[in-house]
Amino acid sequence: MTSQVEVSGDVILLKGDLLFSTIMSVREALAKAVAQANQTCIIDFAGVGRVDSSAVSLWLCLERKTRSRKLSLKAVNIPAELSSIVSLVGLEHTGLNP
């Protein structure tokens, strides 16, 4: 399944799978969306299917980008699989907790 990024105001909706094979195109699209954000970026994972550890890497990249622009970053509708990976690697402080 291909991945997509849709922007609606402060909300960035992710759709599709966040896997090693798809993550670079998602990362590029998210970078563009963050560059256009004003104060807040809400990443909505509602449309995400499968995830692997590259989704955590993507989130960490987003944290760096938003921090450098002094933007607020929030995750909603986090997939259980992603929360499990975050817990497994000890990155609960990243905001990827349900």
Image: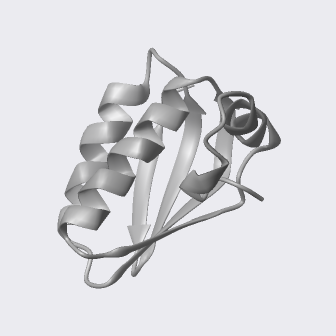
97 vs 75, nearest the viewer? 97
Q: Is residue 45 left or right of residue 32?
A: right
Q: Quadrant of the N terminus?
A: top right
Q: x%, y% of residue 49?
A: 69, 35
95 vs 49, nearest the viewer? 95
The residue that appears at 74% across and 28% down in the rendered structure is 88
Q: x%, y% of residue 70?
A: 25, 75
Q: Is residue 25 left or right of residue 21?
A: left
Q: Quadrant of the C terminus?
A: bottom right
Q: Is residue 98 left or right of residue 34?
A: right
Q: x%, y% of residue 51?
A: 64, 29
Q: x%, y% of residue 55?
A: 53, 34
- Which colour style is shown? one colour
Q: In the image, is residue 98 above or below residue 9? A: above
The residue that appears at 49% across and 25% down in the rendered structure is 54
Picture quadrant where residue 41 is located: bottom left
The residue that appears at 31% across and 75% down in the rendered structure is 71
Q: In the image, is residue 96 above or below residue 75? A: above
Task: State how many labels appear.
Answer: 0
The residue that appears at 19% across and 70% down in the rendered structure is 69
